[in-house]
Amino acid sequence: MREVLNSRLFKIIYTIFVIIFTIFIASYLLFICLERKNIADYAFYIVPDNSMKGSYNKNDVVVIKKIDKLVLEVGNDIVYYGTTGGLEDKLIIHRIISIDNTNKNDVLFTTQSINSALPDPVVHKKEIIGKVLGKVNILTDLNHIVKSQIGFFLVIFLPLVLILIIEIIKTIITLKLERISFTDTEILEEDDRGKHEQKDEE
């Protein structure tokens, strides 16, 4: 085992493996930290359900942009927080099917899931977070891997356990080598003392 761990090929492969795993974890943690945080009017959001399946599936990652509500058009997909009709405090990503701007103080939007025949309760412009610009494929793939049981096991749990096991084995081997080295040093010192004592007696 010691020969394998100390081999140059193993060290190269293991280092590359650890770097890739670290980048993967760091990227996902960075995404989690940035999700729903506005950066220059842009933000990442995770699709909460399959109501827009066909355009956006559950756990897809979309990028949205904060824009003037007056420039929104029928057919745009928007993100908003529901306030009525059983959608209270829920994040909704649906499509605009009609706009009522007859009220000077407010603009009313009617939205609907592409998989439902019924429209949502009326959405006020203040409830709208932003317009969906599209799906971010790399982040979507990353999120789907982490959110699935098999993906989490194969890409997160198993590599982490493997790294921990290898590091523990390396630590044990190092401690054994240090103990052997310490023992050898003691033996040599004993030999030296014995030789000196023998010379003194002569």
Image (cartoon, grey):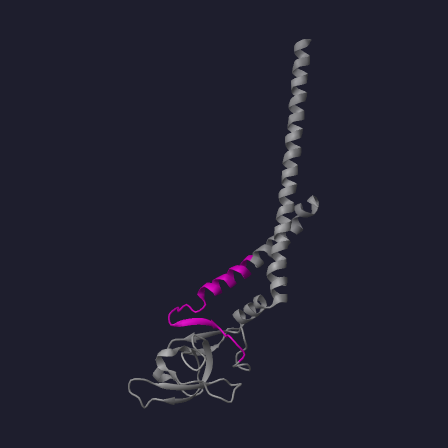
Tell me, yes or no, whether the highlighted magenta stretch contains residue 42. Answer: yes
Tell me, yes or no, whether the highlighted magenta stretch contains residue 134. Answer: no
In-image side of 124 versus 154 (left or right): left
Q: What residue sits 64% from the left and 23% below the top?
A: 189
Q: What residue sits 66% from the left and 41% below the top?
A: 173
Q: Position of residue 150 (x, y in %)?
A: 64, 66
Q: What residue sits 59% from the left and 55% below the top?
A: 18
Q: Is residue 199 above or below residue 155?
A: above
Q: Position of residue 93 (x, y in %)?
A: 47, 79
In-image side of 67 versus 29 (left or right): left
In-image side of 144 versus 191 (left or right): left
Looking at the rendered image, the quarter that the C terminus falls into is top right
Q: Position of residue 90 (x, y in %)?
A: 45, 75
Q: Which residues are magenta?
A: 22-50
Q: Which image quarter: residue 124?
A: bottom left
Q: What residue sits 71% from the left and 46% below the top?
A: 1
Q: Position of residue 30 (x, y in %)?
A: 48, 62
